[in-house]
């Protein structure tokens, strides 16, 4: 087996985090923990969920070319350190990134031979139901998230970088499909 990078993307609410967690357990692939400048939430642990760094450190790494991709979201910075990804690949291990489509497009510019997997919902209605079922957002916020999700899927498909598209209409089948891609 030779090392490889697998990039998993998809809109919020599509189940990519759940799929990734199970796929990592089943395949033994590694997860690339992202950096962020935002403070940890109560249930988050440094090094497991994110690596929490100060803005100055993040900007230094970004400016030094140490990030494979990065983005600013609601005033906070998020990014993927390139060193861990390259070390895993060079050691013939598989490493998985779970990032948004914009991040995947950045990764593709530096690592076009990676495997790109887009997770999509079975329908707009089902995605709206999943987002709404969280119960944390108003009807207007759900509509905005759904519009953003549709746009993200459109951009992903149009980009042509995604070598695989998995519809999450049955969680176990979606997990099996992504595990097969990771192991393939």
Image: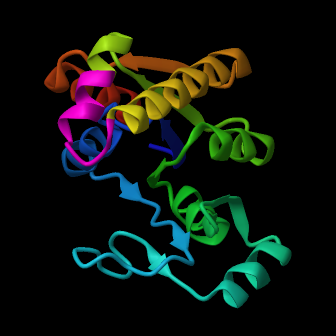
With respect to residue 12, does 95 lie above or below? below
Q: Residue at x 71, y 38 (%)?
A: 105
Q: Residue at x 25, y 33 (%)?
A: 132
Q: Is residue 35 left or right of residue 130?
A: right
Q: Quadrant of the N terminus?
A: top left
Q: Is residue 130 left or right of residue 109?
A: left
3 or 100, which is in the foreground? Answer: 100
Provide the residue span drawn in magenta: 128-138
170 or 145, which is in the foreground? Answer: 145
Q: Quadrant of residue 177?
A: top left
Q: Is residue 36 magenta?
A: no
Q: Quadrant of residue 49?
A: bottom left
Residue 124 place in picture, x, y as percent: 38, 13
Q: Residue at x 74, y 72 (%)?
A: 66
Residue 88 place in picture, x, y as percent: 52, 62
The colour scheme used here is rainbow
Q: Is residue 102 left or right of residue 124?
A: right
Q: Residue at x 62, y 38 (%)?
A: 114
Q: Is residue 132 magenta?
A: yes
With respect to residue 14, does 93 lie above or below? below
Query: In the rendered picture of this protein, how many numbered marks are placed on residues?
Result: 0
* Residue 123 in view here: yes
Q: Quadrant of the C terminus?
A: top left
* Residue 10 in view here: no
Residue 24 place in picture, x, y as percent: 28, 49
Residue 86 place in picture, x, y as percent: 63, 62
């Amino acid at each position: 087996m030779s090392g490889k990078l697998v990039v998993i993307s998809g809109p919020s609410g599509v189940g990519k985090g759940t799929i990734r967690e199970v796929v990592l357990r089943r395949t033994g692939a590694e997860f690339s923990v992202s950096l962020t400048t935002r403070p940890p939430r109560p249930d988050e642990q440094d090094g497991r969920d994110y690596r929490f760094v100060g803005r100055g450190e993040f900007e230094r790494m970004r400016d030094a070319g140490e990030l494979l991709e990065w983005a600013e979201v609601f005033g906070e910075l998020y990014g993927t350190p390139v060193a861990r990804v390259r070390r895993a690949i060079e050691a013939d291990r598989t490493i998985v990134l779970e990032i948004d489509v914009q991040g995947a497009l950045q990764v593709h510019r530096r690592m076009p031979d990676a495997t790109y997997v887009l997770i999509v919902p079975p329908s707009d209605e089902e995605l709206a139901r999943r987002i709404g079922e969280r119960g944390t957002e108003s009807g207007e916020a759900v509509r905005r998230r759904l519009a953003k999700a549709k746009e993200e899927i459109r951009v992903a498909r149009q980009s042509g970088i995604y070598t695989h598209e998995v519809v999450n209409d049955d969680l176990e089948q979606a997990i099996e499909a992504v595990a097969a891609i990771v192991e393939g």
